[in-house]
């Protein structure tokens, strides 16, 4: 740690450069890709929230699951559970999407991605940002990002329900097991990616092994932590893979529900 003396004051300001960056590589590619991917997700999610074609037995669109309103078609509900009644006649997706969206919005990785690509704070390492002040996440509204750990619990439940939906997708429309359609495979791959993203969460890693002084007395938690840590090491990759897989799976089910793709190949 350098000492501060009257003769040699430590400069705490950032380096004052005349140019925006000295980087010569294509540093803007990553923020541009993040910007585009997140924007596509927001536009698609907004459309899906209001689209009524979210169920085609045995498939339910992931953005509408769990379907908790009495307006949900028979077979689309989770074990027949409709705790919100008719949900004021609103789309059931409106009720559920806030939780996975909040989980992603407050995710440590996505925060980095959109702080760089949307807020340019900074757009990349060693690239000057346009903002004069930096207050981090220590005050309102960004201090609210700490809510992420609570979103994790809801997202974990929703992820497991999506996996359950994917298993049910291996039945035919009459409920007989053995159906294998493209939709069954797409929903299963999506559910696995969603679970890999969700359980690789930094909060989950803390839940498995936080506040432990040693692992030797907690072998089960050590195993869980080891597994979660492996997922966590690929968190960025799972974040993007699951972002696209959920859009593909959701759109596919809606195409089937609209009759654009037909059984038995669906
Ligand atoms: Fe990304 Fe929790 S840190 S989901």
Image: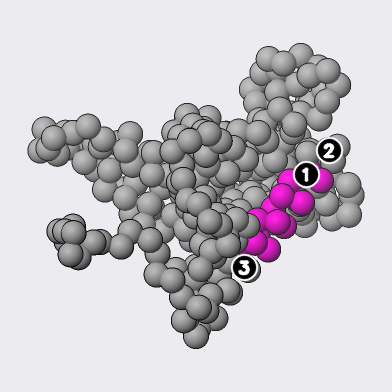
- Disc 2 crowd rating (10 Å Cα; few below 14, some 14-19, many 20+) is some
**What percent of the width, then of the height, locates residue 140?**
53, 34
Report the coloring of the rendering. one colour
Give x and y (percent) for residue 121: 53, 58
Task: Report how far apart the C-alphas of labels 3 and 2 lie in the structure.
Answer: 27 Å
Q: Which mark is residue 50?
A: 2
Residue at 43% in and 71% down: 16
Q: Which residue in the protein does label 1 denote? A: 46
Q: Nearer the viewer, residue 212 or 261?
A: 212
> What residue sits 56% from the left and 44% below the top?
104
- Which element carries disc 3, helix, strand or loop? helix
Residue that numbered label 3 is attached to: 33
- Assess whether residue 69 is covered by the magenta stretch: no
User: Is residue 211 shown above or below 53?
Assistant: above
Mark 3–mark 2 CB contact (< 8 Å): no
At 28% from the left and 43% from the top, the residue drawn is 225
Sequence-earlier tag: 3 or 2 = 3
Q: Is residue 140 left or right of residue 174?
A: left
Boundaries of the magenta span: 34-48
Are the residues flagged by discs 1 and 2 in contact, CB closer than 8 Å?
yes
**Element at badge 2?**
helix
Q: Mark 3 or mark 1: name the one nearer the start of the chain.
A: 3
Residue 187, position in %: x, y? 63, 49
Quarter of the image with the C terminus in it: bottom right
> Magenta includes 47?
yes
Prevailing SS of the magenta stretch: helix
Q: Is residue 119 above or below residue 178?
A: below
Which residue is outermost to the right?
A: 259
Q: Residue 47: where, in percent of width, then height?
A: 81, 46
Mark 3–mark 1 distance (CA, rounded to whole Å): 20 Å
Task: Tell me, yes or no, if residue 167 can be seen here.
Answer: no
Q: CA distance from mark 1 to mark 2?
A: 7 Å
């Amino acid at each position: 740690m350098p000492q501060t003396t009257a003769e040699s004051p430590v400069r705490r300001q950032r380096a004052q450069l005349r140019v925006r960056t000295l980087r010569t590589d294509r540093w803007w590619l990553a923020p541009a890709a993040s910007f585009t991917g997140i924007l596509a997700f927001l536009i698609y999610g907004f459309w899906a929230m209001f689209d009524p074609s979210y169920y085609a037995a045995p498939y339910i669109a992931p953005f509408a699951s769990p379907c908790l309103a009495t307006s949900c078609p028979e077979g689309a509900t989770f074990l027949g559970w409709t705790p919100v009644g008719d949900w004021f006649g609103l789309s059931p997706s409106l009720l559920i999407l806030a939780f996975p969206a909040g989980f992603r919005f407050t995710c440590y990785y996505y925060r980095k991605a959109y702080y760089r690509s949307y807020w340019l704070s900074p757009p990349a390492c060693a690239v000057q940002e346009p903002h004069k002040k930096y207050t981090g996440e220590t005050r309102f509204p960004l201090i609210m990002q700490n809510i992420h750990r609570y979103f994790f619990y809801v997202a974990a439940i929703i992820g497991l329900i999506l996996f359950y939906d994917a298993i049910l997708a291996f039945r035919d429309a009459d409920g007989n097991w053995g159906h294998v359609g493209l939709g069954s495979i797409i929903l299963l791959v999506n559910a696995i990616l969603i679970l890999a993203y969700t359980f690789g969460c930094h909060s989950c890693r803390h839940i498995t092994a936080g506040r432990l002084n040693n692992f030797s007395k907690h072998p089960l938690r050590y195993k869980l932590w080891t597994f979660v840590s492996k997922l966590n090491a690929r968190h960025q990759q799972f974040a993007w893979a699951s972002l696209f897989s959920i859009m593909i799976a959701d759109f596919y089910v809606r195409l089937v529900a609209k009759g654009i793709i037909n059984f038995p190949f669906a």
